[in-house]
Amino acid sequence: MAPASAPTLPIDLGLDIEKMEKVAFILKTTAHPTRIAIVQLLAAHEQLSVNDICERLHAEQSLISHHLAGMKSKGILASSRSGKNIYYSLKMREVVNVIQCLAQCTFL
């Protein structure tokens, strides 16, 4: 008979409940390669038009607009209109920190 293993304690990541909820919200909202690419583009540029984002990601406008609208409705992005163009920018800058943190993971 194998010896009983000691119960494992949760790992303390130094996050309080409020911080964990915010990180979970950011991860759920950006959990798609296109959304992560959009965040990376907007982190590098103050704002970009929908057309600029489509060109840089080589993607259809309908797909990009869908992702932009979803992230805007969740408060991750902000938008402004100038004539016929809509420009997007990052509203929640913490998103960049979370994605950068993940990018540094050695298992990826």
Image: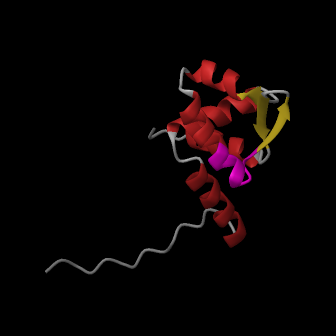
Asked whether, in this view, residue 107 is left or right of residue 82, the answer is left
Residue 35: percent from the left, percent from the top? 58, 39
The stretch of residues the image draws in magenta is: 69-77
Residues 99 and 84: in front is 84
Q: Is residue 73 magenta?
A: yes
In the rendered image, the vertical position of residue 56 relative to residue 75, given as above or below: above
Residue 83: percent from the left, percent from the top? 85, 27
Q: Residue at x 76, y 27 (%)?
A: 48
Quarter of the picture holding the C terminus: top left
Residues 70 and 45: in front is 70
Regarding residue 34, the answer to whether it shows in the image is: yes
Q: Quadrant of residue 13?
A: bottom right
Q: From this viewpoint, which residue is outermost toward the front?
A: 84
Regarding residue 14, the answer to whether it shows in the image is: no
Q: Quadrant of residue 69?
A: top right
Q: Residue at x 60, y 60 (%)?
A: 24
Residue 70: percent from the left, percent from the top? 63, 49
Residue 32: percent from the left, percent from the top? 51, 43
Asked whether, in this view, residue 103 is left or right of residue 52, the answer is left
Q: Is residue 70 magenta?
A: yes
Quarter of the picture holding the N terminus: bottom left
Q: Residue at x 78, y 27 (%)?
A: 85
In the rendered image, the vertical position of residue 4 relative to residue 89, given as above or below: below
Q: From this viewpoint, which residue is outermost toward the right?
A: 82
- Report the colour scheme: secondary structure
In the rendered image, the vertical position of residue 28 relative to residue 90, given as above or below: below
